[in-house]
Image: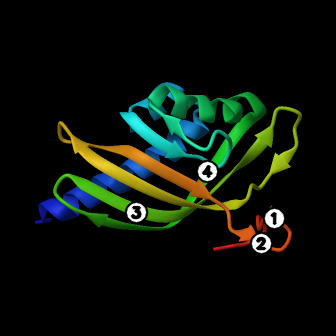
Amino acid sequence: MPTQRERDEAEIRRQVGRIAEGLRAKDPGGLRKLYATDIVSFDIEPPLQSAGVEEKLTNWAPVFALFESVTYEVRELTLTVGDHVAFGHAFARLGGTLKDGTAMSGMWVRVTYCFRKTDGTWLITHDHVSVPLDIASGNGAVGLQP
């Protein structure tokens, strides 16, 4: 029989999987259910910080507007789970087919997730998405693979 910690970790992994499901379905309502209302997000696109679930969903809006179909892949998700908080890190890649028919494989980014257990549900309270920086050029190193 799995321990509570093992059950919690499995549920958090399902929550991360639901991000991909919500993006593929282009379902902001489904994504909303994954985030705490007071989420603070350091996303890949401006602004430097988004606060609250509405701002987080606003950051996903361009994906739904630009893509006809969306793919989202998460690799090497590593979690540390406590009784009421958990954190994890992974690599993720967003891609798909643009509305003009152009296929995009996307780029790999680094993601950090922080979760809080609220009324028995693990919600994302913070996420941070980044790309490595080539200091000499000041450009993101977007061609790296995990």
Residue marked by disc 3 = 88
Q: Earlier in the sequence, mark 1 or mark 4?
A: 4
Residue marked by disc 2 = 135
In the depicted view, which residue is nearer to us: 49 or 92?
49
In the depicted view, which residue is nearer to us: 106 or 134?
134
Q: What amino acid type is highlighted by mark number 2?
A: Ile
Dot 1: few (<14), some (14–19), or many (≥20) neighbours within 10 Å?
few
Residue marked by disc 1 = 138
Q: Earlier in the sequence, mark 2 or mark 4?
A: 4
The N terminus: image quadrant? bottom left
Q: What amino acid type is highlighted by mark number 1?
A: Gly
Which residue: 33% across, 50% down?
A: 115
Percent position (x, y) of residue 14?
37, 51
Q: Earlier in the sequence, mark 4 or mark 3?
A: 4
Q: Are marks 1 and 2 in contact (CB under 8 Å)?
A: yes
> Which numbered circle lies on residue 80?
none
Residue marked by disc 4 = 72
Q: Are marks 2 and 4 in contact (CB under 8 Å)?
A: no
Percent position (x, y) of residue 25?
57, 34
In the depicted view, which residue is nearer to us: 144 or 39?
39
> Separation of disc 4 and disc 3 at Cα?
17 Å
